Amino acid sequence: ASVAWVSQHPPILAGSLRDNLLAGARAGDDAIARAAAAVGLAPLIAARGLDARLDERGSGLSGGERRRIGLARALLKDAPLWLLDEPTADLDAASEADLIARLPGLFEGRTVILSSHSPRLCALADRIVEVG
């Protein structure tokens, strides 16, 4: 309950967008909207709605939208410890910059351990451990 893990490829569940954002958490539509806005998913929700159906492959979602779903799940879980695996991998430069700009606000009050090859993402860290 105290750890939120956001993988490099967040799993997508067959079900609604709402089901995917909650993924076991309990929250109302207002909390979902706040989390979605915080991670940049508001345009997706505005275009498709929370009841939009997704298949287990996440057909129609971009890599950035998948990563943002993973981050929104972490926000809705409200865990004090986040483990992030390459949260900006494979994103284009504009999407990476947008997500990196949002992360400091999401990290407030949490301990975050992340792995990344992105120098721009690593610049957010208080401590860096290089492996390899």
Image: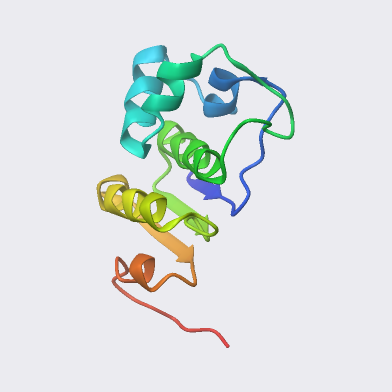
Q: Residue placed at 32% from the left, 69% from the top?
A: 125
Residue 118, horizontal then vertical, whole percent: 43, 70
Residue 83 position (above or below residue 75): below
Res. 91 in view: yes
**Left or right, residue 4 beside residue 34:** right
Res. 1 in view: no
Image quadrant occupied by the C terminus: bottom right
Q: Residue placed at 52% from the left, 41% from the top?
A: 70
Q: In this view, which residue lies farthest toward the bottom?
A: 132
Q: Residue placed at 40% from the left, 37% from the top?
A: 75
Residue 57 position (above or below residue 102): above
- All told, the count of numbered labels is 0
**Left or right, residue 132 beside residue 56:** left
Residue 51, horizontal then vertical, whole percent: 56, 11
Q: Nearer the viewer, residue 61 or 9?
A: 61
Residue 23, horizontal then vertical, whole percent: 59, 28
Q: Residue placed at 68% from the left, 31% from the top?
A: 59
The quarter of the displayed image where residue 18 is located = top right
Residue 42, horizontal then vertical, whole percent: 37, 26
